[in-house]
Image (cartoon, rainbow, N blue to C red):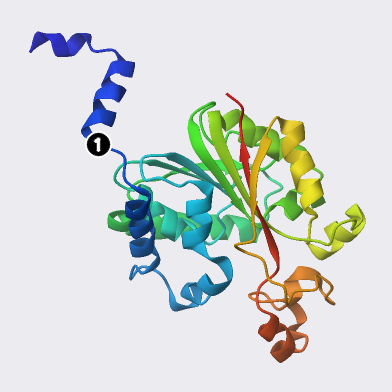
Amino acid sequence: MQWRRFISPLAAMCIAALAAPALAQSEVGALIDRAIAGDHRSESNRLRDKYRHPRETLLFFGLRPEMTVVEIWPGGGWYSEILGPVLRERGKFYLAHYAVENPKTAGWQRDVREKQQDRIADQAAVYGKPTFTSFGPPDYLAIAPPVSADLVLTFRNVHNWSNQKSDQAAFKAFFDALKPGGILGVVEHRAKPGTSFERMIKTGYMTEAYVIELAGNAGFKLMEKSEINANPLDSADHPNGVWTLPPMMRGRVDPEKYGAIGESDRMTLKFRKPE
């Protein structure tokens, strides 16, 4: 068996791929379903499923268990608790969290990251061993090794980077981390077409045209849009912007009215890094 020592890394990857045949779409869906139904999820998080459509969203973006996936700013880990179990055995999972190395990072952001790190460390049987990296554009951009990721995902974050005038740097970081042919999946609060940039920053709702422009400037090509996360009840015009709606309901302005609307109307955009 002396020949084994001469196998190149590329050949080893090919052998591993042959040993682990690709799953059918229905099997991937079943993996996601099991993660969604897992006992590790809190009841409060389960209540968000009807607004966030995790199964449909992740299948739309092409999630597969053997992928290298980067989740950007996972916050408390709502999507992480679904992605982690799916990727645990065959994939690689990077959590590009708040940059604790950055002195400008807020105390609450440090606390959120620490809590998620502790939770994942305590539940290795659920999550495996994902890798935490630091993301804080424009200075902290190493979300994963260059050209290593199959899929980069960001959920309801673009308005934050736009507010910080670092949104273009963020999309460039996503592009650099992805392999040629890799996918960027974006879910974001959706403003009405023609909304001014100042209004977008104030309300937290971004126009599809603006997000598509950011991605295009970074080198991405728009593959497809989906209405999976649309909410026709949301006018995108509220006293405290998107934060008037659940789950935040800032100021508790007419909770019955805004609770009935549900979470925000959202764009779901799938981009591809050219070969």
Q: Where is residue 24 in the image (x, y as percent from the top left)?
A: 33, 47
The residue that appears at 67% across and 54% down in the rendered structure is: 157
Which of the 4 image quarters holds residue 232? bottom right
Give how far across and how far down residue 23 sits, in percent. 31, 45
Give the position of the C terminus as an image quadrant. Answer: top right
Whether 201 is drawn above or below 3: the answer is below
Q: Quadrant of residue 119?
A: bottom left
- Name the secondary structure under disc 1: loop
Q: Is residue 57 left or right of residue 174?
A: left
Q: 196 and 142: which one is in front?
A: 196
Q: Quadrant of residue 260?
A: bottom right
Residue 101 position within the rendered picture, expressed as x and y whole percent measured from the top left: 61, 42
Query: Does residue 255 sit above or below 211 in this rendering?
Result: below
Residue on which disc 1 sits: 20
* Residue 174 or residue 111, whichever sits in front: 174
Q: How crowded is mark 1: few (under 14 residues within 10 Å), some or many (20 or more)?
A: few
Q: Residue at x 48, y 46 (%)?
A: 62
Residue at 86% over, 62% down: 202
Is residue 209 something one can see in this rendering?
Answer: yes
Q: Which residue lies furthest to the left in this view?
A: 1
Question: What residue is shown at x 36% (from left), y 69% (from top)?
Answer: 37
In the picture, which quadrant includes the N terminus? top left
83 versus 146 height, above or below: below
Q: Can residue 141 be seen in this view?
A: no
Location of residue 43 in the rendering, given as x and y in whole percent from the top left corner: 44, 78
Residue type (three-letter) at the residue carrying disc 1: Ala
Q: In this view, does 151 lie to the left or right of 13?
A: right
User: Looking at the image, which is closer to me, 75 or 159?
Assistant: 159
